[in-house]
Amino acid sequence: MAIRASVPPQLVMPTSWRMVMNRLRYRKLPRTSPDRIQPFMQIRNSGLRYGAIAQLLHWAVVLLIICQFVLALRADALPLGPAKISVLALHKSSGMTIFALAVARLLWRAFNPAPPLPSATPRWQRFAAHLSHIALYGLIMITPLLGWMMSSARNFPVSWFGVFTLPDLIGPSRARYDQLHEAHEILAYTLLVVALLHAAAALKHHFIDGDDVLRRMLPKLPRQ
């Protein structure tokens, strides 16, 4: 004969409460789509946007280039003396940093192809974008090298924030210094013009074309 254990009435859960508890127990919590999480965690480039490494390298170079022009103008306004030399030393260190970051970005890009332009982009715009990228990379790398050679021609040291000193690339020569100085300035302002055209094209894609060309280089979700 089976004996049923008696349960005090106050411990018996009402049926309605049991239904609520079961619903909470088996309820599926909402999950965020991996596609929406990915942009925040994405390190490498994808077919839709640049990864965190490419974005970091890009905006670091942009900020340093702006600083370079500020430092150059500041140095030109100062008389020859310790303050001017200090500003020029910082200008050289920043230039070498830009060169190193440009090399790093080229290496990263070799293993992480850039996202393609929107399919509706005209062929001439694709060609212009490709040409501007080549010009930007070339100018970003050649301009600091000319500055380095210019300092070597005057036997001025080039150090990286006082941590170490770079070797001279050429021997002292005032004539070479004058030529390199002029070439350095021309390429610097050419870089400024090409960078402004590049920025204008990105803004045109964003505000006129309404695509994600600019947004994919920003640390935000692309528009759906």
Image (cartoon, helix red, strand yellow):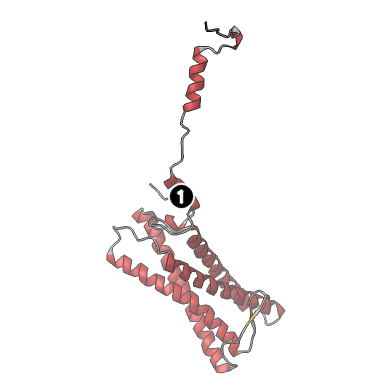
Q: Who is closer to the viewer here, 183 or 156?
A: 156
Which residue lies at the image location 54% right of the left edge and 85% below the top edge?
181
Residue 136 visible within the image? yes
Q: Amino acid at mark 1?
A: Gln
User: For residue 209, what is the image quadrant?
Assistant: bottom left
Above or below for 217 versus 32: below
Residue 179 percent across, percent down from the top left: 51, 89
Above or below for 156 versus 197: below
Q: Who is closer to the viewer here, 72 or 131?
A: 131
Residue 215 percent across, percent down from the top left: 43, 55
Label 1, on which residue? 38
**Residue 222 relative to residue 169: left or right:** left
Which residue lies at the image location 47% right of the left edge and 23% below the top edge?
23
Residue 137 percent across, percent down from the top left: 45, 73
Above or below for 199 versus 173: above
How many marks the image carries: the answer is 1
